[in-house]
Amino acid sequence: MKRRVFLGMVGSLASVGTLAYATRDPVTTLEVRVWLSNGAATYDGVMDRILEYLEEILALEHWSLELSAGGTVEVSTEDGARVTTSGEWPMAIASGAIGSRDITPAADVNVLVTDGQMERAPTGYGLPHIASVGGARHLSSLDSFDALLATPEADVDRWIVPNERGPRTMQILVHEIGHALGLHHDHGVSFRDGDAIVATPMLSSYAWTADYGGDRSRCGESYPDPADHTRKLSLAFSSCAHRDLEAYSGGMTPQNR
Ligand SMILES: [Zn+2]
């Protein structure tokens, strides 16, 4: 992350009041709410597609998932990272309002999907309980979850999917939600699958970049050299990400000034 922007954001957050972090131990219900920016909301079926995928991907055994659509919000930028790093989206969640519109935050994850570009990083951002990502147009063009997994390149058991724009954008959405739940990049793994190298959501495209700092994941495995292998993506969290999600016990109660 860019420290400068992060500090700027904390400064603006401090001015809206206090985010109270509550510990709910154990978490039996995970509340996740998805909002669309005005730009994102112009794509047909995008919210339904997002909810359909997240319903599968976030449905872990130890919690019951309460996934909902928050609605459309008018934000000043469609940039999927900047809307959070500038403090705009976090402040909207913290204050329970954006402009004249009420926002009812979910206890665990509040994610905003925008019409932002997905070509150059950063394309999204995740903070505890708050995340945003661009790429609404790519999400709306995704096939259904079952249809994607039925393609010849996919693996239905391990949710391995082609490294194409739609699936990649979905993986980045899941990546930012992972950050919102306290996961880090080293919760991601990459592994060989035939001729391909597969990256899980928290590692994502870092699997293909030489400058990624870590040499092994929290799961204990080292990262195979991507070299010239075909790149594929898994939509499933790694085993150590699963383990730490099972230990997740934090929720958030925004308090107004
Ligand atoms: Zn990240």
Image (cartoon, grey):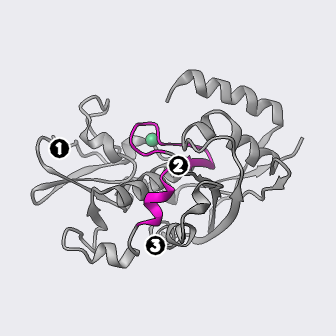
Taking the view exactly as shown, the residue that stands out farthest to the top is 4
Q: Which numbered disc, 3 or 2, marks the residue that appears first in the sequence?
A: 3
**Is 212 on the left-hand or right-hand side of 246?**
left
Disc 3: residue Cβ within 8 A of ligand 1's nearest atom: no
Q: Residue at x 82, y 55 (%)?
A: 101
Label 3 CA crowd tier, 10 Å (few <14, some 14–19, many 20+): few
Q: Secondary structure at mark 1?
A: loop
The residue to which callout 1 is attached is 224
Quadrant assignment, res 194: bottom left
At 68% from the left and 35% from the top, the residue drawn is: 87
Magenta stretch bounds: 117-141
- Residue at 74 percent of width and 33 percent of height: 13
Along the viewing direction, whichever of 139 and 97 lies nearer the viewer: 139
* Residue 225: image location, x then y, percent: 15, 40
- From the viewer's side, name the closer residue of 31 and 68: 68
Circles 1 and 2 in contact, beta carbons < 8 Å? no
Q: Which residue is mark 3?
A: 56
Q: CA distance from mark 3 to mark 2?
A: 19 Å
Which one is in front in this view, the residue at disc 3 or the one at disc 2?
Answer: 2
Q: Position of residue 149 (x, y in %)?
A: 30, 74
Q: Residue furthest right?
A: 257
Q: Quadrant of the C terminus?
A: top right
Residue 213 magenta-drawn?
Answer: no
- Numbered mark located on residue 133 in the image: 2
Residue type, mark 3 in image? Glu
Disc nearest the viewer among 1 and 2: 2
Figure check: 4 above or below 115: above
Q: Tags 3 and 2 in contact by the CB under 8 Å rule?
A: no
